[in-house]
Image (tube, rainbow, N blue to C red):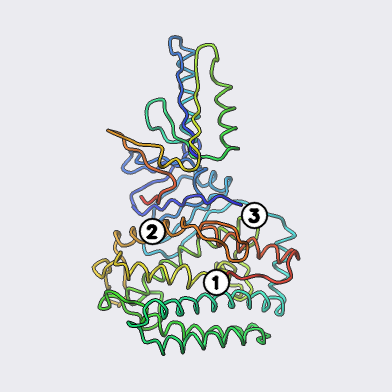
């Protein structure tokens, strides 16, 4: 399924900047960065739990927020892109 | 059931594959062109002398992503695979079966039954779909002799007998392959099978697609814990993926040959995409190779219903499901190995 992960990390303090970097790193590991703090991850429910747990450990729940959007298996009709930075689909043929 | 992961094909020779976190990163001229999470991949296939970092090889081995290196023309060079999966008891059973001629013949008969059945289906289907354009008598003659061959298989006791039946049937089948090419007859014709090197366009494509299929079949076998190097019909030879070649017999016609025919008949490839060398060897250019790879990936994602399991799956998972059935037979959970009979 496609899971959209977005986050808002408060970067007023150095600790916050550190959290931001850590959150970004985890997201990069499992998905494609489509906008600055928006990631599209194609993964199964089990992997999703793991990622969620990893992210939960990093953030400060008082200051930061995380959102997960579950778009299911038939996500292709649900996503539309306009403008710069076109993304690619990891389930399409990958020939480089 | 397993989820069909994607395969990454790297055809540009100046690319370098590196590992970053959980991603494989493709670098070209020191800059990153693409990063793909490893969990989305089942395999990575590289063409030409593309480099890969040792860290990536390690990560691939750990996560069961098969990393294969091929030459520019699709000949196998090397593969990186981690520790054996599955359990040792299954593998030891496989070795014992492989050493036992009678047992081997039993399994080989299954593979060849599948092969002949599927080949016959293709001939029958061509005769049905194009009754006016094709020589129907020739096709039904071939179909009948394939049916005869299938009927005579249960009496074949030894591997030698099975090979004899298979050889004769294959000659029959290949004798009508040229007839089934309906378009671009000047550029694409099939006289006989040849390889190393392939001497005409059709053979070049068939050879290339067989290599892709062998890669997929071998990794399917590894996933269920079988040793792809120890075969039943193909005997042991250093470096030969005997069991993968065995299992592939069932899919050659239905997955590979028909795929090649479709590419030609729908004009997805054309004669301009092939280069003939001085020694007669035919090579494909990069664009043609890319077209074939793209179509192959699309083909693997097509949904079918497995004729025996009755389960919906992608074409790409068929080798895996057959490997699973073979493992079940070796474990003694089934009385016979059921080949993949496509209808």
Give left or right: position of B327 versus B26. Answer: right
Residue at the (61%, 71%) spot, across then down:
B339
The location of residue B65, given as percent across then percent down, is 53, 49
Q: Residues within 10 Å of mark 2 (few under 14, many from 20)?
A: many
Q: Closer to the camera: disc 2 or disc 1?
A: 1
Circle 3 — which element?
Answer: loop
Q: Residues within 10 Å of mark 1 (few under 14, many from 20)?
A: many
Contact? badges 2 and 1 (CB < 8 Å): no
Give left or right: position of B169 versus B102. Answer: left
Query: Where B89 falls versus A28 (above or below)?
Result: below
Circle 1 — which element?
Answer: helix
Q: Quadrant of residue A51?
A: top right
The location of residue A91, given as percent across then percent down, is 44, 47
Residue ID for mark 2: B293
Circle 2 — which element?
Answer: helix
* Same chain, labels 1 and 3: yes
The location of residue A43, given as percent across then percent down, is 52, 39
Q: Closer to the camera: disc 2 or disc 3?
A: 2
* Same chain, labels 2 and 1: yes
Q: Quadrant of residue B123?
A: bottom left
The location of residue B313, given as percent across then percent down, is 54, 56
Query: Where B328 falls versus A12 (above or below)?
Result: below
Query: Reading the chain from its start, which is encountered first: label 2 or label 1?
Result: 1
Name the foreground residue: B125 vs B23.
B125
Residue ID for mark 1: B250
Query: Where B135 falls versus B16 (above or below)?
Result: below
Q: Chain letter for mark 3, please.
A: B
Query: Reading the chain from its start, which is encountered first: label 2 or label 3?
Result: 3
Q: Chain letter for mark 2, please.
A: B
Residue ID for mark 3: B84
Q: Residues within 10 Å of mark 3 (few under 14, many from 20)?
A: some
């Amino acid at each position: 399924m496609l899971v959209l992960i977005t986050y808002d990390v408060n970067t007023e303090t150095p600790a916050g900047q550190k959290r931001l970097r850590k959150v970004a790193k985890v997201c990069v590991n499992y998905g494609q960065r489509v906008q600055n703090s928006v990631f599209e991850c194609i993964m199964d429910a089990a992997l999703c739990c793991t990622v969620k747990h990893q992210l939960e450990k990093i953030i400060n729940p008082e200051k930061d927020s995380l959102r997960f959007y579950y778009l299911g298996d038939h996500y292709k009709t649900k996503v539309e892109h306009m403008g710069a930075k076109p993304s690619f689909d990891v389930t399409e043929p990958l020939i480089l | 059931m397993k989820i069909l992961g994607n395969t990454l094909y790297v055809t540009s020779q100046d690319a370098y594959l590196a590992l970053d976190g959980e991603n494989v990163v493709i670098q070209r001229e020191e800059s990153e062109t693409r990063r793909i999470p490893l969990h989305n991949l089942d395999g990575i296939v590289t063409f030409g002398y593309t480099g890969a970092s040792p860290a990536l090889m390690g990560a691939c081995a750990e996560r069961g992503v098969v990393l294969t290196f091929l030459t520019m023309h699709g000949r196998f060079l090397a593969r990186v695979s981690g520790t054996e999966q599955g359990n040792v008891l299954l593998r030891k059973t496989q070795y014992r079966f492989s050493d036992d001629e009678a047992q081997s013949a039993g399994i080989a008969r299954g593979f060849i039954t599948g092969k002949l059945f599927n080949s016959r289906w293709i001939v029958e289907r061509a005769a049905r779909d194009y009754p006016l354009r094709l020589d129907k008598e020739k096709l039904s003659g071939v179909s009948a002799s394939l049916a005869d061959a299938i009927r005579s298989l249960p009496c074949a006791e030894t591997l030698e007998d099975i090979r004899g039946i298979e050889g004769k049937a294959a000659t029959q089948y290949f004798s009508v392959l040229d007839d089934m090419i309906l378009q671009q007859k000047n550029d694409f014709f099939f006289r006989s099978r040849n390889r190393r090197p392939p001497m005409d366009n059709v053979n070049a494509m068939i050879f290339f697609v067989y290599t892709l299929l062998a890669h997929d079949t071998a990794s399917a076998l590894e996933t269920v814990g079988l040793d792809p190097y120890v075969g039943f019909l193909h005997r042991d030879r250093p470096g030969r993926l005997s069991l993968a070649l065995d299992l592939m017999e069932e899919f050659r016609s239905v997955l590979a040959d028909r795929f090649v025919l479709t590419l030609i008949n729908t004009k997805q490839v054309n004669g301009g995409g092939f280069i003939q060398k001085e020694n007669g060897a035919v090579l494909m250019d990069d664009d043609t190779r890319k077209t074939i790879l793209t179509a192959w990936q699309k083909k693997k994602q097509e949904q079918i219903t497995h004729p025996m399991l009755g389960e919906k799956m992608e074409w790409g998972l068929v080798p895996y499901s057959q490997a699973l059935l073979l493992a079940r037979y070796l474990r003694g959970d089934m009385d016979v190995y059921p080949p993949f009979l496509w209808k």
